[in-house]
Amino acid sequence: MAKAAAVRAAYLGGRPPCGHVTELLDRHLADVEQRIADLEAARGMLHELTRTASATDPATCTEGDICRILSAG
């Protein structure tokens, strides 16, 4: 809401809000790109854990192992 108010204030003040809108869009895009990068990293970790889980023989677990799959990641 504050962002919309800033754009409106610029407009009502006789200044074109294009620069402000572009800045807001750039920041939002950067946030989205960071979230995508974070999700891609999490996906990679999950793929690796899935491969580890598929290759793990439960018969080789010891009593002290809570979960070797998660501790390996």
Image (spheres, rainbow, N blue to C red):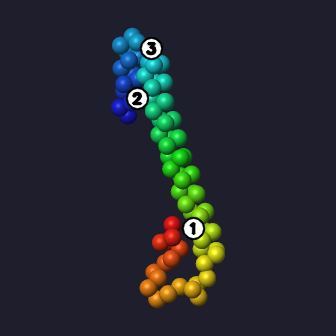
* Residue depicted at x 35% and y 13%: 13
CA distance separating discs 1 and 3: 51 Å
Q: Distance between the residues labelled 3 and 2?
A: 14 Å
- Res 9 label: none
Helix, strand or loop for disc 1? helix
Q: How crowded is mark 3: few (under 14 residues within 10 Å), some or many (20 or more)?
A: some
Q: Residues within 10 Å of mark 2 (few under 14, many from 20)?
A: few
| CB within 8 Å, label 3 to label 2 | no
Q: Which mark is residue 4?
A: 2
Looking at the picture, tell me which residue is in the foreground, 4 or 18. Answer: 18
Mark with earlier residue (1, 2):
2
Say which element carries label 2: helix
- Residue 12, given in percent of the width and then of the height, sits at 38, 15
Labelled disc at residue 16: 3
User: Mark 3 or mark 2, which has the lower sequence index?
Assistant: 2
Q: Position of residue 35 (x, y in %)?
A: 50, 46
Relative side of 3 to 35, left or right:
left
Residue type (three-letter) at the residue carrying disc 2: Ala
Q: Residues within 10 Å of mark 1 (few under 14, many from 20)?
A: some
The spot of residue 60 in percent (x, y) is: 57, 86
The residue shown at (64%, 75%) is: 55
State yes or no: discs 1 and 3 in contact (Cβ < 8 Å). Answer: no
Residue 61 screen position, x and y as percent: 53, 85
Amino acid carrying label 3: it is: Pro
Residue 49 image label? 1
Residue at left 53%, top 41%?
Answer: 33
Total marks in image: 3
Mark 1: amino acid: Leu
Q: In whole angstroms, how far apart are the C-alphas of marks 1 and 2?
A: 43 Å
The residue lying at 45 percent from left, 81 percent from top is: 66
